Amino acid sequence: GKNQYIICTEKMKKEAAYTMLLSNHLHRAEEFDEFIIHYQPQINIDTGEIIGLEALLRWDHPELGIIPPNVFIPIAENNGLINSIGQWVLKSVATQSKKWQDMGLSPLKIAVNLSTVQFNNPNIVQDIKWILKETGLNPMYLELEITESAVTKEINYTINTLQELKKLGISISIDDFGTEYSSLNRLKVLPIDRIKIDMQFVRGIEIDEKDRAIIKVIINLAKNLNMKVLAEGVETKNQLDYLYDKGCHDVQGYYYYKPMPADEIQSLLESINNKK
Ligand code: C2E
Ligand code: CA
Ligand code: CA
């Protein structure tokens, strides 16, 4: 109608219906305890030690099974639930982290992914302050991962927000570096502790000279800007050796560990503590 037409296939209809279903069910996921946090260790190659963990959210839907974050986070960003889900993740991670410390396990920094929508919420600093106070977690054990899209918005807002978070003692990482619009000029002025090399480049190490070139550039960039660097999605010995040789000694990936539920991480940390 109205001199326009829309192409709509059966497949598109099904996808739209599925998205709508998930969007509706997301409203009750938190209250029904359907969210689970997995933790993936980060390793320093020199010592082989676990230097930190990344918290990764999963949704265990009673009928549909485990739904990955790549599917439901964009939906939560659209229906406005991302702020409360993000709060829940931060609070759960801080509570868990404090609990592990109180049990006597060696304290580890835990990284939490922040959606761009969440980062751009003007209450974010207050919310995080409150969570730290409530849980009693020392901010030095919290790291926030933001993507380039979060830092390409209004530059003054970004700088101020990051500086306030840094003042609290929290660390900041740039996730998926190099996959979105990157502004080196912005990177220069932002208080960033670490750059994470995206899995997409790590995958290419054994097959594409261009991926190797990009990895070298990112490692040198981080070094020259006095930032730490970590490569994610490391699956093979060849990838590990290449990264090590080029000067990236912190890694995360299936080569060492997959993301695991809290109880498995706890057993792992306990067995390490016992060896010390
Ligand atoms: P990400 O932050 O880049 O997380 C890395 C993803 O790669 C995770 O997928 C992780 O399970 C996976 N991974 C880690 N090592 C390997 C490996 O060696 N090989 C392969 N093939 N994959 C590996 P996951 O858990 O499905 O998360 C996907 C994305 O969802 C994350 O990407 C992150 O952007 C987002 N996400 C996860 N949890 C949260 C959250 O609590 N809040 C927000 N806003 N986003 C989240
Ligand atoms: Ca991440
Ligand atoms: Ca990433």
Image (cartoon, grey):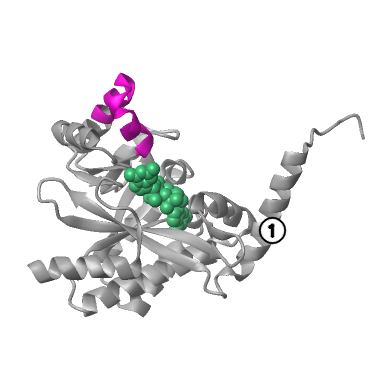
Mark 1 residue element: helix
Residue 139: percent from left, percent from top:
28, 67
Query: Can you see residue 157?
Result: no
Please report the bounds of the magenta region as a residue range. Answer: 198-216
Q: Nearer the viewer, residue 150 or 87?
A: 87
- Give percent across and percent down for residue 34: 53, 69
Residue at 24 percent across and 49 percent down: it is 256
Q: Amino acid at mark 1?
A: Leu
- The reply, left or right, for residue 44 in relation to residue 131 is left
**Could you tell me if residue 221 is visible in this image?**
yes
Q: Is residue 223 magenta?
A: no
In percent of width and height, residue 205 lies at 29, 28
- In the displayed structure, 163 sits above or below 177; it is below
Q: Going by the picture, which residue comes out furthest to the left?
A: 276
Question: What residue is pinned by disc 1?
Answer: 21
**Is residue 207 a member of the stretch shown in magenta?**
yes
